[in-house]
Image (cartoon, rainbow, N blue to C red):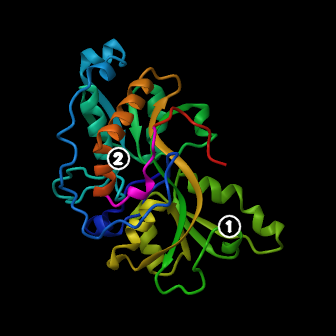
Amino acid sequence: MRPRTAALAVALLPLLALTACGSGSGGATARPAAQGVDPNRDVVSQEQKVDAIAALLPADVRQGGTLKVGSSFGTPPSAYYPDPATKKPAGLDVDVTDAVARVLGLKVDREDAAFETILPALGSGKYDVGTGNFGVTTARLKTIDFVTYIDDGQGFAVRKDNTALTDVTQLTQLCGLTIGTGAGTTFETTLNTQKHLCTDAGKKPYTVQSFSENGAILTSLQQGRIDAVMSTINGLRYQAAQPAAGTKFVGEFHRLDVGFAFKKGSPLTPAFQAAVNQLIKDGTYQRILDKWGTGGSAITQSQISPLEHT
């Protein structure tokens, strides 16, 4: 659930950018990411191909040897560029994708794509799989299949000096305020479809301000043009752990499974599920989550297209 970052914020992105939206079953509450995260630490290269799992792939994919991945970048700890000059990708999504590809014996052909373009492109065959911290929702399940790999979800953050909002768990706590979020995300959908909760309670509805660039969300929050941000739990916690951001995490709203996204009926899902479960079994999965400070979002088993959490 995550669009591209504004050019003016590129230099600050590793510290300041927001995330998109998603989660996976079996996880506990997410922990703040450590400020000393080393994006260059290798936790993937030891992974080896597992022939029995690779055999689950369609023959044409095995023979082609390459996985076309549409990825949304811009938001640590999910996926971003620690050094914008080299544009070497890093993040939890990147490590999990690369590790799964190793189990399957495939090379990753990764394309940086705008968040809102990835899911439609799966149907056209442009990508085999999409990554972008995509949350499993009832609406998306109509056209998309998922293989889950993490537990995340929807949360809120405000400026650190905001004393009025300290523990936000209900949208009615935001009535009369301006909430910033990413365009085309589950956050935007949630906020817009539930505005009526404020008017139902006899209160002034909140205003939703959507941004196509994540850097602009943070800038607007810092400058007081929006009162709060709705984004991913792990992303907002990560951001709040960076002193330069000047933000604080103020609550979870809704947990979601997060997974690799595929066109409906894709034959790739059984192989991906088995590969994620192999990473969980051999310990690489936990090393990846520990690297990015998201160990509290671990799942115990990958699922294919589970129902949205209630």
Q: Looking at the image, which residue is at 55% across and 42% down?
A: 136
Q: Amino acid at mark 2?
A: Asp
Q: Looking at the image, which residue is at 30% across and 55% down?
A: 80
- Mark nearer the N terminus (2 vs 1): 2
Magenta stretch, residue numbers = 292-301
Farthest top residue? Answer: 59
Look at the picture and state if 46 lies above or below 237.
above
Look at the picture and state if 102 lies above or below 81.
above
Determine crowd level at label 2: few under 14, some 14-19, many 20+ residues with C-alpha closer than 10 A.
many
Asked if residue 74 lies left or right of residue 117, the reply is left
Asked if residue 34 lies left or right of residue 205, the reply is left
Magenta segment's dominant SS is loop
Closer to us: 217 or 65: 65
Check residue 49 for magenta coloring: no
The percent coordinates of residue 122 (x first, y second) are: 45, 31
Q: Could you tell me which secondary element the residue under label 2 belongs to?
A: helix
Q: Looking at the image, which residue is at 32% across and 43% down?
A: 96
Determine crowd level at label 1: few under 14, some 14-19, many 20+ residues with C-alpha closer than 10 A.
some
Q: Identify the residue position indicated by label 1 in the image.
A: 171
The percent coordinates of residue 206 (x first, y second) are: 68, 70
Closer to us: 127 or 48: 48
Q: Could you tell me which secondary element the residue under label 1 belongs to?
A: helix
Q: Quadrant of residue 205?
A: bottom right
Q: Looking at the image, which residue is at 48% across and 61% down?
A: 233
Asked if residue 39 lies left or right of residue 22, the reply is left
Label 2, label 1: how many angstroms apart (C-alpha)? 29 Å
Q: Are marks 2 and 1 in contact (CB under 8 Å)?
A: no
Q: Identify the residue position indicated by label 2 in the image.
A: 93
The percent coordinates of residue 259 (x first, y second) are: 46, 41
The label number, if any, that marks residue 249 in the structure image: none
Look at the picture and state if 68 lies above or below 45.
above
Q: Amino acid at mark 1?
A: Leu
